[in-house]
Amino acid sequence: KAGVTQTPRYLIKTRGQQVTLSCSPISGHRSVSWYQQTPGQGLQFLFEYFSETQRNKGNFPGRFSGRQFSNSRSEMNVSTLELGDSALYLCASSLVGTDRGDEQFFGPGTRLTVL
Amino acid sequence: GDSVTQMEGPVTLSEEAFLTINCTYTATGYPSLFWYVQYPGEGLQLLLKATKADDKGSNKGFEATYRKETTSFHLEKGSVQVSDSAVYFCALTSSGNTGKLIFGQGTTLQVKP
């Protein structure tokens, strides 16, 4: 089975721009979670989508948003980029409804640099 | 709120040494506990997990036991290899909230030949 894929792998943007990151989960996985990883704050939960609905949200400003499509692929969007948004953005998928439903499988991440 | 605390790194060991990375947690209810590993330039890989008190998770020679009385989930390996060099993250999910992992700060392990 193919793993979680994220595109693009690297992005460079300037302050004030917006960006969209994409995540394709493992086939059959309907839950997708997003995380931000920075050296200072570590790994922080952004949000989770399940069956096209946001089920959980972390403590991030409204500039961070996401959505999930009917094929379980997910996108996250960051508007009005700030320097502090530079980070590795990780997506993870899980197989909800099984005894392994709490296991999240991560993609390689998208490295976003804001100049 | 729920939280995870890991020992600070980096941890530097010689090959074949014994490894312990400490992890304690604060959570209401009965969380599931995990160890993830991140190799340079990669995403996170699930190393092992435990879902209830006294459960022992194990994989690739690594072990961790869910200790509710001490709210701990320490990672151990009897003999580390150079290939184990990576960053290790302890994490939890709250019961009924499986889509949200709460991570510790991570511990960098460097194993020297």
Image (spheres, rainbow, N blue to C red):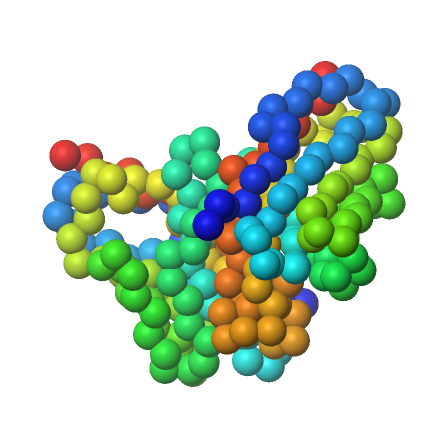
Quadrant for the C terminus of chain B, please.
Answer: top left
Q: Is residue A43 above or below residue A82?
A: below
> Residue A91: image x %, image y %?
61, 46
Quadrant for the N terminus of chain B, please.
Answer: bottom right
Q: Residue at x 69, y 52 (%)?
A: A72
> Residue B23: image x %, image y %?
42, 62
> Residue A108: image x %, image y %?
52, 38
Toward the viewer: A86 or B70? A86
Q: Is residue A88 above or below residue B78?
A: above
Relative to residue B55, is residue A18 drawn left or right?
A: right
Relative to residue B10, is residue B31 drawn left or right?
A: right
Q: Residue at x 33, y 61 (%)?
A: B75
Relative to residue A37, is residue B84 drawn left or right?
A: left
Residue B50: name its quadrant.
Answer: bottom left
Residue B111: name its quadrant.
Answer: top left
Q: Is residue B98 visible?
A: yes
Q: Residue at x 55, y 80 (%)?
A: B30
Toward the viewer: A101 or B110? A101
Toward the viewer: B65 or A3? A3
> Residue A2: image x %, image y %?
49, 45
Q: Residue at x 45, y 80 (%)?
A: B52
